[in-house]
Amino acid sequence: MRRKWMGTVSVLGRIRIGKSMVQFSAKVSVPVSLWDTQSGRATGKSKTALSINTSLDKICVAIHSAYRDLLVKKENVSALEVKNVFQGIASQQDTLVKYYEAHNEHFLKSVGVNRCMETYKRYGISLNHLKRFMRKKYNISDISFQALTPSFVSDYDYYLRVELRFASQTIVNTICQLRRIIKIAINNGLVRNDPFHGYEYITQPIVPKSLTTEELNTLIKSKLSRPNLNFIRDMFLFSSFTGIAFSDMRNLTEQNLSLAEDGIRWVHLKRKKTGTPCHIPLLEIPIKLIEKYKGLAKDGKLFPMISCSKTNIYLKRIAAECKIDKRITFHMGRHCYASVVTLSLGVPLETVGELLGHTDWRATRIYAQVSNEKIGEDMQLLNKRLSGKFHFEGNKDIDVAI
């Protein structure tokens, strides 16, 4: 197509693939006298004609190159997709932010089925960090997958680590969520070269988050100054002796309890975070706590719990009154259950994982820290088992030549 303007025509290109067709401006103007409609080229060998034809040839080469690149990633390619790649305008499904947003929308539909709202919120927070990073670093609101490089990932890591000064684990979690998006895009054929190639997560040694046996005993025996602190302490102890997380504990009702034929009382629940079923036999302390607060909560709940944030504030005061020099949070109760209550007393790691509702033993390993006391007891038991099995007589006459 041509449009007359002061003795020249503007060249419009056309891409046709199968039944799809799209037009675009070639951004080339040609004198009317030089243009040949039949060939779609300028006629003659003047400098003007040669320059125009060279520009048009480069456009043709770029279009065919874009078409071949798209064929590598997908079987059916439309004319619009070729135009977008050729012009450097990625389609919505080929841009990082749009794809991330689509992932989050799809994830939201799974909330309450096999996903939890907190995980969805974390994806949203990570996406906002990514948007601010691209705006600050590159002054862009989105980027095509094909433009992603290892340097992009390194710059993002630097932004989180140095400019935002995030903790090491926060950086790992944020980067991991971006990594999951990239992996999905790779599996869908949208990314050919993995921008995470060569990237290494910088982590810090895992610091045990559990109380020690002595600290847990101190917490149990201490006389606290206010009744509400006693209640918060009791809720923490229930978690410490069952391994039940805060979000699951606040939803417990009588329906979650059962009595087995052997007289053992159980808690049966499905974890809110992962949807994994948990079956936990109740120890003496949790049973006493259930009886203590029976009938005090509304809607048939076992405990009249307050918000997690307020609970953690009170736990700080409790730690100060008990002279425990640790930052106690409610989540630490699960760590206590895994480390002090179960693993240190001989419960196998696999069983601990089942009680916590984990599907991967590596997650259990983070919670269950082996204490030095447990190691000492195990080695003493090993020493007894080895006694008499091996005989070694040392030679009293020692001659050492140096």
Image (cartoon, rainbow, N blue to C red):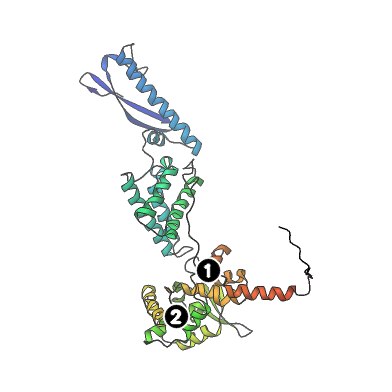
Q: Residue at x 41, y 79 (%)?
A: 319
- Nearer-the-camera pick, 394 or 245: 394
Q: Quadrant of the C terminus?
A: bottom right
Q: Which residue is mark 2?
A: 235
Res 117 → quadrant: bottom left
Relative side of 60 to 72, left or right: left
Give the residue pinned by disc 1: 367
Where is 141 relative to 82, above or below?
Answer: below
Q: Quadrant of the N terminus?
A: top left
Classify 164 as above or below 365: above
Q: Which residue is at the front of the view, 101 or 180?
A: 180
Residue 272 vs 136, above or below: the answer is below
- Amino acid at circle 2: Met
Q: Is residue 353 left or right of residue 311?
A: right
Location of residue 303 in the rendering, given as x and y in whole percent from the top left corner: 43, 82
CA gap between label 2 and label 1 equals 19 Å
